[in-house]
Amino acid sequence: MTSAYSLGQRRTAALAEVDNAKYTWFHFRVCAVAGIGFFTDAYDIFSIGIASTMLGYVYGRCDHTTVDPTVSSLTTTQDLALKVATPIGTVIGQIMFGWLADKFGRRKMYGIELMIIIFATIAQVVLPRGSFNIIGALTAFRFIMGIGIGGGYPLSAVMSSEFASTAIRGRMMTSVFSCQGWGSLASAIVAFVLTNAFKNSILNSIQNSDSSSAIPSIDVMWRLLIGLGVIPGCFALYFRLTIPESPRFTMDIQGNIRQASRDIKSIFGGTEYIPVSEDDEETIQRLDIPTASWEDLRSYFGQLKNFKVLFGAAYSWFALDIAFYCLNLNMPIILQAISFGRPNSYDDSKSSCSGLTEGVFHSLLSSCFGNLIVSAAALVPGYWVSFLLIDSWGRKPIQLMGFIMLTILFMIMGFAYDSLRGTLKAKAAFAFLYCLANFFQNFGPNTTTFLIPGEIFPTRYRSTAYGICAASGKLGAVVAQIGFNRIQVNQAIKNDPTTSTENGAIESVKKILQLIAFFMLSGVLSTLLLPETKGQSLEDLSNEEEQTSYELLPTHTEAGS
């Protein structure tokens, strides 16, 4: 039996099937397909932190323009280019794919962005050595990869939110985004394993006074580190290309309630809501749902209540990513400055720039170990605490709490930095605070800034507006990396690069932590502009006067009658 509903009632009834659905295998499939993409994205983004150190040993040089003047390393300009290329590409991808998904459909775009990532990753790995400008080529391909990564943000978030039932939407979206933590952890594990796997090859070459023969081993290491990230993406590609279209897009943008109803029935079961008359099908956009246009866009976001939500979501993400990407893209540099992960017998005299020494290997190993500890102890647990509380405590309280805690932690680390480096116990306290800050980023605004934009906008602009918010975040990542680089350069000028490199790094990190504290405080204020989204349907959250209830008509008709 199929039930006949009035025009607006059919739409509301069909949406209710999605909003009230119990957790099914299909929900798991959506989370897995979207989550694997985020795993790949995070792996590709954060592996460059340690990969750039490896690249410096192979293709770098020793002078005052480099990241570390005491050992072969990339110039600060090269290091900056490698680390901002992906976020810049991501900004473009987020805006472009966000608009395309609202224009042509979520399903038509889903998978294309992953193809871009796979192509760009493979292209990085197969770049030749020699006189070829490999750093420039790597930068170009990481920019292209960033476009693909950017496309994954609005598509994965919107697909997850539009297929999720109201009661579990927060946990579904959090489980998708938490794969970013696993991707970051995986990149740290792979780097640590590769460094140990090539240990004998590197040390034997150095001990035989032939440090140049260690370079090919390190060259293979960074290629493997980056290249292995393509494997999970290849597994996810088929499922992204075959996932069904979001019923909300079919209904609210294409205006095809009949097809949306059938899709919902095939996915979740339940009733198929057929038109009272076939002619009514084409009138749904005019009667119930405004169509997307520049005029309608200006009208919708021209309302203060809607604009402040867009601004609050976009700026919160901007502020958060200044801290998140500044710390994670530069983790090896920061960990070296705070002596985190080094053995007690570590010798800072790594090299006289005449060639690689054992100190170089131990420095690389300690950076990998530090990355691994921070990821395992802080990043991943933060995501899963968010998962447990997101649908009970709510998005806004978690984001507020996170920004407040981060403000306090970064103020302590920044303004008490010198004291916290004074003794072994003080360094341990600093390491604990650093891990705690990473924890509250993920049990806090790093998770909620991903969720909220996927819930608060109407279907016709959900992906576009999400892309704008996400692009604001990656703009913060670019600003953070440029700022980090400039502070590094300015500090190097103030210090004698041949004798005071470590002091310069210490001063750089101290200033950066102090600046981050300010942005975390501003995130507290922007969060106040946002609504709480837990337990509400996407239609209720869109700030539009749409029908939210329905009555069953007394007429029942057989299917096809």
Image (cartoon, helix red, strand yellow):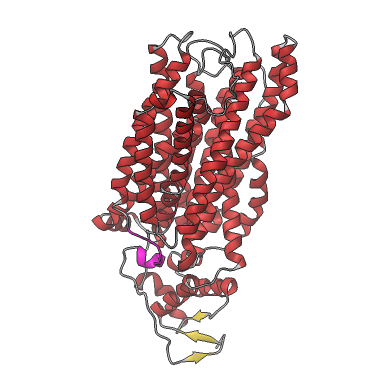
**Between residues 6 and 533, which one lies in front from this camera angle?**
533
Q: Position of residue 3 (x, y in %)?
A: 50, 86
The reply, left or right, for residue 427 in relation to residue 203 is left
**Between residues 139 and 28, which one lies in front from this camera angle?**
28
Quadrant showing the N terminus:
bottom right
The reply, left or right, for residue 375 in relation to residue 448 is right
Quadrant showing the C terminus:
bottom right
Asked whether residue 536 is drawn in magenta, I would say yes
**Between residues 317 and 428, which one lies in front from this camera angle?**
428
Q: Please report the residue visible at 43 percent of the width from the left and 22 percent of the height from the top.
A: 422
Residue that extends furthest to the left in the rendered view of this protein = 304
Q: Is residue 257 above or below residue 362?
A: below
User: Magenta span covers which residues?
Assistant: 531-541
Magenta: main secondary structure? loop
Residue 79 visible in the displayed image? yes
Q: Please report the residue visible at 39 percent of the width from the left and 32 percent of the height from the top.
A: 413
